[in-house]
Image (cartoon, rainbow, N blue to C red):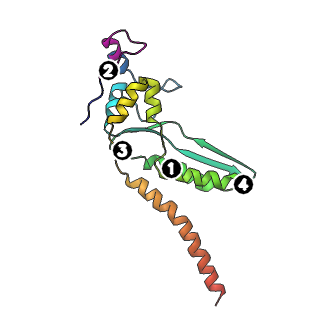
Amino acid sequence: MNTPPPLPTTPNASSQEDVFVYLSRPLLGKNGRPLAGTEGMTLHQIEDDVLRGGRFRIFRYNFSLVIISFQRSSGIQYIRSGHGPGAHAWPWTLLSMVVGWWGIPWGIFFTIHTLYTNCMGGKDVTRELLAAVLGPQRAADVMAQALKPQADILLWLLRIFVLLIPVSIFAAIASVEHSHHR
């Protein structure tokens, strides 16, 4: 298993002990609570988990109201190593499939972009988040050593489900066309 890079001196730390104290704290979001998925973890534990394949991700969703369409991002979600993003991608994708298409003209484009992003596991923001918290050099070192996330059956099922939609529509149209020609 990979080991974290040596601890750097940070602008807020005057000694190696200060760095250890810093890494012993939780990763808090803007609301002062731990980021989703990091509950009970210190920065050091998060860093170690990222080395084993954990990732911070955001998922897209969109909704439309006839002439206006909105595309938004979920909050940052930490997906621990050994877990895949599929379970987190499904709700946002289904929401977009139900209420995203209906805006003219952007609803369909936003929905296709949302489906693509979520089917690829969401947007990985690990490097950027670690750079903001640990510093750019340490984040780059961690990401260079980090394992790729594990394959996720729920994400593959989502991809299959999304791909079956146009196939089903095409089959329905072909069936109707075939029945009209009889």
Give the residue pinned by disc 2. 7
Q: Residue at x 46, y 57 (%)?
A: 158
- Mark 1 or mark 2: name the one nearer the start of the chain: 2
Give the residue pinned by disc 1. 118
Q: For the residues labelled 2 and 4, say whether their Cβ atoms are less than 8 Å apart.
A: no
Residue 149, disc: 3
Q: For the residues labelled 3 and 2, say whether their Cβ atoms are less than 8 Å apart.
A: no
Q: Is residue 69 visible?
A: yes
Indicate the secondary structure of the residue bearing disc 2: loop
Residue flagged by tag 2: what amino acid is it? Leu
- Mark 4 or mark 1: name the one nearer the start of the chain: 4
Residue flagged by tag 3: what amino acid is it? Pro
Please tell me in which quadrant of the rendered image residue 73 appears: top right
Indicate the secondary structure of the residue bearing disc 4: loop
Distance of label 1 from label 3 (alpha carbons): 15 Å
Q: Please state the horizontal and vertical placement of residue 75, each as a whole percent of the image.
A: 53, 37
